[in-house]
Image: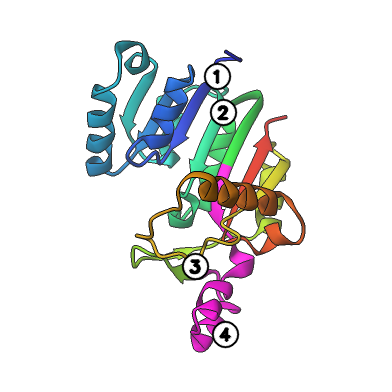
């Protein structure tokens, strides 16, 4: 096994990511402000072997409250995936998360790509919606909520300003963003090909720039 890391998963949802990391040997702290999701996570954790349960700590809290619960530099990795679009105080949230990182620690963000908001409605034939998307940084997600998208340039500047400059970034869902939310994934070799395609496109110009989501990795100086 490689290095065992101290991981903070902010907005962990039902805990899927946190449990996978704990199974891999890492120590994981999950923050979730939604009580129902936290209950689901606790139920899933209770089914795990004792050795995994002891590596996971779950806390009902908002991402802006990290300074209340932890000392600066407490974690090697901080994950904030699918959360930033709901945050009213984006820069304050990111600054607080960066302070939780030990020197050399990784801040991992998964955000909606604000530079490609016209693609989804445009490819669906919603011409009016696509035109409107050029002049806004908000969109209606698949839960029916109006949330914010973020642009690579703005986040790059923010990360530099909070001493966790951008180290690498990738596109996510280049070819599969148009799939229905309840669509069944392909099986076997076809799934392997699809994952290989998305992985390569997410690392390759110019495809990664038109992805629906962006994965940004900042490293604490």
Earlier-in-chain disc, 1 versus 4: 1
- Look at the numbered discs 3 and 2 and tell me whether their residues touch, using CB distance below 8 Å: no
Crowding at dot 3, Cα within 10 Å, few <14 / some 14-19 / many 20+, comes out as some
Across and down, in percent, residue 4 comes to 55, 15
- Viewer-nearest of discs 3 and 2: 3
Residue 38 place in picture, x, y as percent: 27, 37
Gap between marks 4 and 3 measured at Cα? 18 Å
Answer whether residue 91 is visible to the viewer in this image: no
> Mark 2 near mark 1, Cβ–Cβ under 8 Å?
yes
**Label 2 secondary element:** strand
Quarter of the N terminus within the rendering: top right
Give the structural element (helix, strand or loop) at label 1.
loop
Disc 1/disc 4 C-alpha distance (Å):
45 Å
Discs 4, 3 touching: Cβ within 8 Å: no
Residue that carries the numbered disc 2 in the rendered image: 77
Q: Residues within 10 Å of mark 2 (few under 14, many from 20)?
A: many
Disc nearer the start of the sequence (1/3): 1
Circle 3 — which element? loop
- x and y percent of residue 63 in the render? 43, 40
Q: Dot 1 corresponds to which residue?
A: 5
Verify CB contact (< 8 Å) between mark 1 and mark 3.
no
Q: Does the CB distance between marks 4 and 2 fall below 8 Å? A: no
Measured Cα–Cα span from mark 3 to mark 2:
31 Å
Closer to viewer: mark 1 or mark 3: 3
User: What is the C-alpha distance between the residues marked 1 and 3?
Assistant: 35 Å
Mark 4 — residue?
A: 131
Mark 4 → mark 2, Cα distance in angstroms: 39 Å
Mark 1 closeness class: few <14, some 14–19, many ≥20 residues within 10 Å:
some
Closer to the chain start, of discs 3 and 2, is 2
Say above or below: 193 vs 115: above
Q: Secondary structure at mark 4?
A: helix
Residue sitting at x 38%, y 36%: 16
């Amino acid at each position: 096994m490689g290095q065992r890391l101290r991981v903070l998963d902010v907005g962990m949802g039902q805990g899927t990511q946190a449990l996978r990391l704990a199974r891999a040997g890492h120590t994981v702290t999950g923050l979730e402000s939604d009580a129902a999701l936290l209950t689901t996570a606790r139920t899933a954790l209770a089914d795990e072997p004792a050795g995994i349960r002891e590596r996971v700590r779950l806390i009902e809290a908002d991402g802006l409250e990290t300074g209340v619960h932890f000392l600066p530099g407490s974690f090697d990795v901080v994950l904030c995936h699918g959360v930033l679009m709901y945050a009213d105080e984006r820069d304050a949230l990111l600054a607080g998360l960066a302070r939780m990182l030990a020197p050399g620690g990784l801040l991992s963000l998964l955000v909606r790509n604000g530079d490609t908001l016209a693609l989804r409605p445009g490819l669906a034939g919603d011409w009016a919606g696509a035109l409107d998307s050029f002049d806004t940084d908000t969109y209606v997600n698949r839960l029916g909520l109006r949330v914010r998208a973020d642009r690579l340039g703005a986040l790059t500047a923010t990360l530099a300003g909070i001493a966790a400059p951008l180290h690498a970034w990738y596109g996510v869902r280049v070819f599969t963003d148009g799939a229905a939310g309840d669509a069944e994934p392909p099986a076997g070799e076809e799934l392997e090909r699809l994952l290989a395609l998305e992985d390569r496109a997410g690392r390759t110009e110019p495809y990664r720039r038109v992805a629906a989501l962006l994965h940004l990795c900042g490293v604490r100086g």
